[in-house]
Image (tube, rainbow, N blue to C red):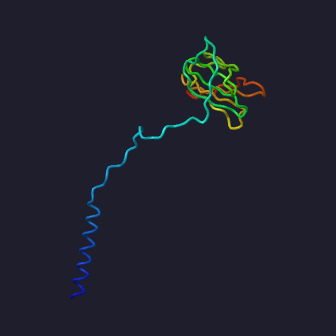
């Protein structure tokens, strides 16, 4: 009979620990406080040269290629600006409009993995304009209609 009482006592004690463990209040999940995050550093800081009559309207995207050219998409001016690795202006292309190589709003730009093609997303029409590198310049190739 002692053996049965000991088994019953152990069983009751085990059950009590199990109930106590399950009934313990769960802590509130910890939330991330953005103000406690470490400050982020840029990989590379670049000063862009400009003239008195040249200002960005609204930068939407920046990409660079292995030739260290920097492509800056400007949402408001509907243009792609090109700079060298030192930040000196090299040229631009595109303009506001509905024709080949024209944009209403440049929302994003991406280079293909082999960097021979630049894709420009026009968020107004939800189109993707494709520019192909002919060796020296990017030339308008086609428009992929993704919004219709």
Q: Position of residue 116 (x, y in %)?
A: 72, 32
Q: Residue at x 69, y 19 (%)?
A: 91
* On-image quarter of the N terminus: bottom left
35 is higher (above) or lower (below) than 23: above
Q: Position of residue 78 (x, y in %)?
A: 59, 19
Q: Residue furthest bottom?
A: 1
Q: Splitting the image into 4 quarters, where does residue 80 fall?
A: top right
The one nearer the camera, 60 or 123, is: 60
Decide if residue 41 is on the left or right side of residue 33: right
Q: Position of residue 16 (x, y in %)?
A: 24, 69
9 is higher (above) or lower (below) than 142: below
Q: Splitting the image into 4 quarters, where does residue 85 fall?
A: top right
The one nearer the camera, 98 or 77, is: 77
The one nearer the camera, 92 or 105, is: 92
Q: Position of residue 90 (x, y in %)?
A: 70, 21
* On-image quarter of the C terminus: top right
Q: Residue at x 32, y 49 (%)?
A: 28
Q: Residue furthest top?
A: 53
Q: Residue at x 29, y 63 (%)?
A: 21
């Amino acid at each position: 009979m002692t053996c049965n009482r000991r088994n019953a006592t152990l069983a009751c004690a085990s059950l009590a620990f199990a109930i106590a463990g399950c009934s313990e209040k769960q802590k509130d999940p910890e939330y991330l406080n953005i103000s406690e995050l470490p400050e982020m550093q840029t990989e590379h800081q670049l000063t862009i040269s400009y003239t008195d009559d040249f200002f960005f309207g609204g930068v939407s995207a920046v990409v660079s290629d292995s030739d260290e050219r920097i492509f800056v998409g400007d949402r408001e001016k509907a243009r792609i600006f090109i700079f060298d690795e030192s930040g000196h202006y090299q040229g631009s292309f595109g303009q506001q409009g509905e024709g080949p190589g024209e944009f209403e709003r440049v929302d994003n730009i991406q280079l293909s993995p082999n960097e021979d093609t630049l894709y420009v997303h026009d968020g107004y029409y939800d189109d993707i304009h494709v520019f192909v590198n002919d060796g020296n310049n990017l030339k308008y190739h086609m428009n992929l209609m993704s919004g219709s």
